[in-house]
Image (cartoon, rainbow, N blue to C red):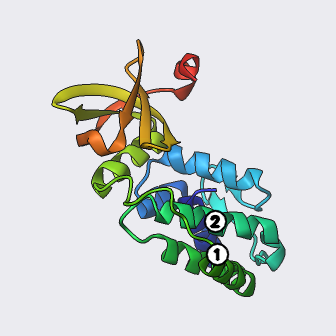
Amino acid sequence: MTNRQLEIILYLNEIKKTTIQELADKFEFSKRTIMRDIDRISSLGVPVYTQSGYQGGVSIPESCKFQQSFFSSEEIEDLVLALHLIDRLRRKDTKSSILKKIELLIPELTFLKEQDFMDYLQIELFQEPLYKDETVFRTINKALDEEVLIEMEINRQKYCAAPLSYALRASGLYLYASDGAQLFVFPIQDIVNCRITDQSFDRRDYQKFK
């Protein structure tokens, strides 16, 4: 589950009913991406319903209240560990804000797991954040979600390619991308002048590069 999907759950839990367009406007993603998010949330067992037509939309039952059983102890532990790893990848602190959202659902358990990691875990994989330009990272993330091509410059050479996935290696964070003919592996720290284009792609067309 992504941070955005968790935010959608919390938002729906608060207002109970909205529309795909309103969610797309609020979270600044396309309707197609929000619909994929809703499908993913539903597959996790969250009672989110969609209805087309007049007075349709996206809704969650009025009676729905997330209980402590929404996440197991092991799942909370995994989430907190993942947040600590992410915290070592970037300069911006997103760990604190995400933890606060999870604490809204399971306050005591999340606090205890966070204290355990703070007391007993040291992450020494990287001396400094793996990417320094938050704009590049946000652009790539949005292109991955929206399935659109990006234009970027690496070592003064320009590329237009479909972003496929990230790869975390001992030497750093890399982007797998393709122009349809070949697969590229770019160090994130080398990417500059990255921007989203209006050309979409279908990830299934690039299965041969996996």
Residue 1 placement (x, y as % from top left)? 64, 56
Q: Secondary structure at mark 2?
A: helix
Q: Which secondary structure lies at badge 1?
A: helix
The residue sitting at 46% across, 63% down in the picture is 88
> Which residue lies at the image location 49% right of the left edge and 44% below the top edge?
170
Upstream in sequence: badge 1 or badge 2 = 2
Q: Which residue bears the numbered disc 1?
A: 117
- In this view, the mark in front (1 or 2): 1
22 versus 167 height, above or below: below
Q: Label 2, on which residue?
A: 81
Q: Based on the displayed image, in which of its 4 quarters is residue 196 positioned?
A: top left
Location of the C terminus by quadrant is top right
Say which of 204 and 74 sits in front. Answer: 74
Q: Residues within 10 Å of mark 2 (few under 14, many from 20)?
A: some
Question: How many numbered circles are shown?
Answer: 2
> Alpha-carbon neighbours of circle 1 within 10 Å: few (<14), some, or many (≥20)?
some
Residue 19 horizontal/vertical position (percent): 55, 59
Q: Position of residue 57 (x, y in %)?
A: 61, 58
State whether residue 36 appears in this view.
Answer: yes
Q: Amino acid at mark 2?
A: Leu
